[in-house]
Image (cartoon, coloured by chain):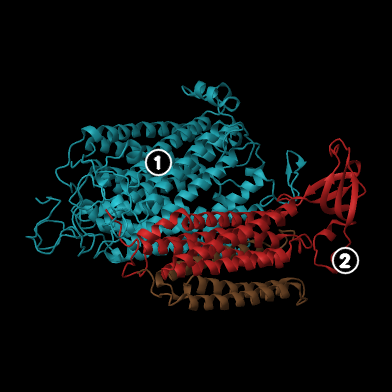
Amino acid sequence: MEIPYTVENRPDTGIYNAKLGIWLFLASEVMLFGGLFSAYVLLRVGAAPGEWPHGWLNVTLGTINTLLLALSAITTLLAWAACKLRQFGKFKFFHACTILLALTFLGIKSYEYHDKWIHYEIQLTNGKFADGHMREESKDFDLAKKTGSVTIEGHVVEDRKELMDLRTPEAQAAKHTEITIQAADIKKMENYSPRHNTFTAIYFTMTGLHALHILGGTIVIFYLWGPGSRMYKTDPERFTNRIEVSGLFWHFVDLVWIFLFPVLYLT
Amino acid sequence: MSESEQPISLKSYIRLCAVVFFVVLCTTSGMIATSFSHIGEGWTLKVTLILAIAIVNAFLVAGYLMHLLSEKKLVYTVLIFTVFFFAGLMGLTMWAMGDFPVGTITH
Amino acid sequence: MQANVQQFPPFREAPAHGHAEHGHHEHHEPGFWSKYIFSTDHKVIGIQYGFMALCFMLFGFFLMLLMRWQIAHPGMPVPLLGPLLAKTLGAPAAGGAISPDLYNSFGAMHGTIMVFLGVVPLAFAAFGNYVVPLMIGAPDMTFPRINMASFHAFFLGGVVMLVSFFIPGGAAQAGWTSYSPLATTIPTHGQAFWLVGMVCLITSSLLGAVNFIATIIQLRAPGMTWMRLPFFVWAQFVTAFILLLAFPPLEAAGILQLMDNLAHTSFFLPTGLAVGGQLANVSGGGSPLLWQHLFWFLGHPEVYVLILPAMGIVAEVIANNTRKPLWGYKSLVYSVLFVGFLSFIVWAHHMYMTGMGQKIATFFQATTMIISIPSVIILTCMFLSLWGGSIRINTPMLFALGFLPMFGIGGLTGLPLGLAACDLYLHDTYYIIAHFHYVVAPGTIFALFAGVYFWFPKMTGRMMNEFWGRVHFWCSLTFMNIVFMPMFAQGIKGMLRRMSDGAVNYSAARVPNAIDALPGTVMQLNDWIFWAAIGLGIAQIPFIVNVFWSIGHGEKVKNDNPWDATTLDWQTPTPPPHGNFEHELHVIRGPYEYSQPGHATDFTPQDEPESADAPRTTSTAHH
């Protein structure tokens, strides 16, 4: 038995089933990311003065990512339009662009994550803090046994608070040099992983969940671009609807980034 | 047919997209400029301005790229309720976290 | 019974323009796996959900019996099951006695399993999946494969939850509410299992919610306008919306707590947190209250998810067994919509004790009081529906009638809790336990029993045994009240919840000089409650036997519509074949056209043609 309105619109609502389905799903996703955004707001507002970091993220890379995603939203729309106009070749081209843009986004994101992973804050025994990207550690480096040394490219500060706001002129002026620190001088060493402070925690969680959505969307679009595009020959309208519905999901993922970028990178 | 608005031609769509992308470029630059500027004391004014620009950006993507401006009333209704509940979640929680009896919370 | 090989074929959507590939699959007999495990037919999925949910409920019931034993006899080995517990769970059940940590894990899992694996899947997913497409005249749900995926996500979530009992450290132990920092600092991975299980269950619910809403909006048969929908469908519609929009913040919170547990972040851990006397090695800066807000943002709408489908079932059973239309259909519809809407802005009445300011407490108190209005309207409409009715007593009707006063007690006892001033005293006492169990246990679960007895004939073509059904009802009603009524008294006397020693350390016997120590009468009630719970368990045996026995040996139905019902779910063959309806539907009247003056019969199905001479292709239900 056939389910009605899978392709044609239901007269009184004016839409087909999958379109209603995807909008309902997107509504739930608004609440999901909304929950995370409200967590962000509460953690930031609740942080003690001077305890919330600024400028820890690379604005250039973030901007590039924003523009890549915006462009991919556009190629997604054009892919759907091409399908609607039955121009299969153009559809293939536009969605190939979408996929490539998405993968580039993920690539840049991985680079950013890696950058944080090798970025260390080292509490020294003399009360100062060394902060920078780890270049290498000596073969016998063992923090527990206090042997060996690490080399970072960074700087040393007196007070931890100076590491918080990198937008201040002082922080901008800080010179980054190669510093080697002996394990014996290290009291505590932690990289900028989620556990480092609530900012990195919410940053990794929100961008991580967003990246998972990008990955999922890319896989779906890839499937429809590749093996799934067979349906274009047998039922082009239904196939176009699938492109539209997956496109809506992709646009939503772009929408989330439109808020993530300024909130995390620019404020 | 599943679309009330038929794409007339790919060219017209590309034109629309070019406009949208240009505006996105402008808004993004606007946000970055605001972020690095020295408007206002602290971050509050900056954050408000940046979020306002972001909302414009979102409106463009949702309105034009997701066709929300020409979407059916049913979809609109679902989304309006969603926005209301999200506002409730955000607003009421922030209010709750801010409304404590005097002297019972440290900061 | 029209059994034929085409009954449950795996559903594959045929393309709009027929294609040779799919042309002949109807004649292909599906294998066991496609037919029973990986079916996309909503009826099979509904039964899968129902069966699993009932199993989980039974398991949750056993957890409760173990807890009640411990409360009545703290520290004593559990009779009969003690050695088994010791063998399977090891140290926490040493000597067959339930240790405090084990008690806590039973408590947390009893709540979680009953709510998320028992009642919601049964009320929403099982009954909803089976009945809603039938009631609206649809061939299936809009997205059958997503429906199947939703069941399997539920199943996976259930497995993860049950497995957590057997890992070192045991299952989650921080209550079904999993408050941080306790949930993060207990040395077990059970909490992580709980969170992963919850993510699976939330995913299942979200997929189901999308399906229900899309189905009800898009697949109503011609003529089935919104105001001709049976109330059950309205209730499921609102429930689906609640699930769709309220669950995701809990999923967000779950992800954050999972990060706290596994990646050692501090979303919910405050600065300066000390664990075991030592400063915790975390960054701090988090907020335990944030977890509570995000949890209860779902937690409150969740209770409406628990009750609305039940109200829908009771409405259907009452209309059918009073042989008259429901009183106040429009009021019911607007009330249920209003309840759904308001349920999103009342949540912090679960948090009055967190030191909230007066303004915010007043806001939530106001919305909480207001939400009681539509709830009362719904209950009143159902009571009024009985007036002047030609009441037919059968097992479903008994359970539906039983629901009314039981839910009344549950709801009314909630009013002092909605008022902040009283709640400060009653919060986290046994009064709360009594209140919410009254609403869910003799409330919702009675309605669900009514649903089982009511729709069993449609699913199987046989009636359940009436005598044992009545035994089940009267024994359950009696024991439910003996179990839960005393808890009000205990709570008002100050007995707190979640105490593994049954509050014996606060009793007058143990601390005679303490002011307001719990008197012997209150402590004695623990014993009564335990034996009543045993009685309640025994009372379920006739039900379980009845269900299985009646499948093969129950009295066969005389026709497709044994209850002489008007809704479309009774206008199908029995059991409904794949695609549900064998004739084209055109709905021309409302859902409760019973006892219409001048009509030959005391009921008129929704789609029966106006002319009495028009032939009917399925039901031959007339006297």
Going by the numbered disc 1, the residue's amino acid type is Ala
Please say whether residue A72 is visible from this viewpoint: yes
Towards the viewer: C112 or C585: C585
Towards the viewer: B75 or C282: B75
- Chain B in the picture: what colour? brown
Report which quarter residue A86 is drawn in. Answer: bottom left
Please say whether residue C375 is visible from this viewpoint: no
Could you tell me which quadrant the C terminus of chain A lies in?
bottom right
Task: Determine the secondary structure under disc 2.
Answer: helix
**C323 to B91, vertically: above or below:** above
Instruction: Report the residue at 68% width, 76% height from top.
Output: B30
Q: Residues within 10 Å of mark 2 (few under 14, many from 20)?
A: few
Q: What residue sits right under mark 1 in the picture? A: C53
Instruction: Report the residue at 67% width, 52% height from top.
Output: C267
- Chain C in the picture: what colour? cyan
| Residue lying farthest to the left in this orientation | C613
Distance (Cα) linking label 1 and label 2:
63 Å
Report which quarter residue A158 is drawn in. Answer: bottom right
Chain letter for the red part = A
